[in-house]
Image (cartoon, rainbow, N blue to C red):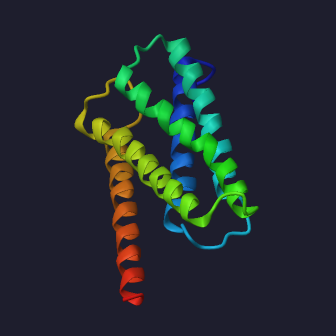
Amino acid sequence: MDGFSSLALQTITRFSGRLSLMVFSIIFLSQGKNMDFKPYLIFAVVHGIHLIELISYVTLSGNKLIPIRVAGGALAYSFIFIMPLLDYRHLNVQLSKKKFNLFENVYLYYIWLIFFMSYLPRVQGKLPNVGGHYYEFVILLAWVLILLILKLITLFRTQKRFT
């Protein structure tokens, strides 16, 4: 659609980020449920591809980076790439359930925050030249907020069952 240009790379990067959000959504909402696949590994691969596209786009476009966003993103990517290893260690009883649950909660809510902080400034119009349309940003920010609401509802229901 956009040919072979930096605009095309920007579009691909944007859509791979949205795919990552959908994969993350499944993980976020199904935390604690036994899954027959490796969700953290899948997310690391999908988001790793997004990272490669993002770095390529930023490099080719010459866009200036915002240091605080880079630092927050770097920490998020560290979590994303470490989590499959911790999941593996937990499944092989090399990491206690308590420690794994602690790290998993920090991971999930921090990555949620990063998605939130990705779409909030877009809705506010504070990130020029990000591509896409305003209505897309509103829908995606709304989805990220709905994710948290659904998660909190699930947590409150779970706590009520145990009290």
- The front one of 18 and 70 is 70
Seen at 38% across and 57% down, the residue is 143
Q: Which residue lies furthest to the right in this view?
A: 92
Kindly indicate the quadrant of the structure image that contains residue 82: top right
Seen at 35% across and 52% down, the residue is 139
Taking 92 as reference, is 55 left or right?
Answer: left
Q: Is residue 123 visible?
A: yes
Seen at 68% across and 43% down, the residue is 45
The mark total stands at 0
Taking 163 as reference, is 4 left or right?
Answer: right
Spot occupied by residue 114 in the image (x, y as percentages of width and height): 41, 42
- The front one of 36 and 10 is 36
- The front one of 83 and 67 is 83
Taking 147 as reference, is 1 left or right?
Answer: right
Q: Quadrant of the N terminus?
A: top right
Seen at 55% across and 13% down, the residue is 60
Q: In this view, does 44 lie above or below 156?
A: above
Taking 68 as reference, is 85 left or right?
Answer: right
Q: In this view, does 3 lie above or below 101?
A: above
Q: Can residue 15 be seen in this view?
A: no
Spot occupied by residue 99 in the image (x, y as percentages of width and height): 55, 58
Q: Is residue 155 above or below residue 94?
A: below
Kindly indicate the quadrant of the structure image that contains residue 132: top left
Spot occupied by residue 106 in the image (x, y as percentages of width and height): 45, 52
Q: Residue furthest top?
A: 62
Spot occupied by residue 154 in the image (x, y as percentages of width and height): 41, 75
Kindly indicate the quadrant of the structure image that contains residue 79: top right
